Amino acid sequence: MSLQATPVAVHVGRDDLPFVDIGGGNLLKVIRVDEAEGLWIVENVFQSGFAVQTHRHTGPVFGYTTSGAWKYREYDDVNRAGSFLYEPAGSVHTLEVLEDDTRAWFHMYGANLNLRADGSVESITDGPSTLAAYYGLCEAQGLARPAVLVS
């Protein structure tokens, strides 16, 4: 009989990964990317008026809001502190931020297909491309390369 190593939990502290400015005081932190699973987890701090291009998800998304308020233009529900959101694969929406310093965490699988007004795909955003952009922004903003959980 052989003994197998027991998996060890990995802790990432609040300040272990930096936020980077993605424009207009809107911030991004990439926490985890697992390319094989298609998984990417990010945290954002958004300012009022910020909007994400209309997009369709190829996999499910889970979101949790810890402060502020945001919604999808296509729906009436407003996500506020303590709100949990599930988005099934194939859902289409346009995220818009209603209050300054809105903080939300997103756990995504697959990709965002960013859509033109006619519904055709303009570009694709996924975990690896978001991670590359995050690393690039860290470097441009004078931050050390962060130890994102990558596999």
Image (tube, grey):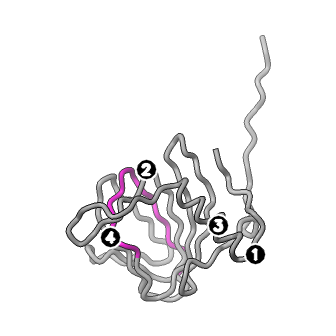
Distance from Cα at disc 4 to Cα at disc 1 = 31 Å
Q: Amino acid at mark 2?
A: Gly
Residue corresponding to mark 4: 54
Q: Magenta stretch: give its range.
A: 52-67
Residue corresponding to mark 3: 136
Residue corresponding to mark 1: 142
Sequence-earlier tag: 4 or 2: 4
Residue corresponding to mark 2: 110
Distance from Cα at disc 2 to Cα at disc 3 = 22 Å
| Secondary-structure class at tag 1 | loop
Instruction: Indicate whether residue 98 is drawn in magenta.
Output: no
Distance from Cα at disc 1 to Cα at disc 3 = 10 Å
Residue name at image x 70 percent, y 77 percent: 141
> Going by the image, does 112 lie left or right of 146?
left
Sequence-earlier tag: 2 or 3: 2
Residue 115 position by quadrant = bottom left
Sequence-earlier tag: 4 or 1: 4
Viewer-side residue, 126 vs 39: 126
Category of crowding for the residue at label 2, using alpha-carbon neighbours closer than 10 angstroms: few (below 14), some (14–19), many (at least 20)? some
Sequence-earlier tag: 1 or 3: 3
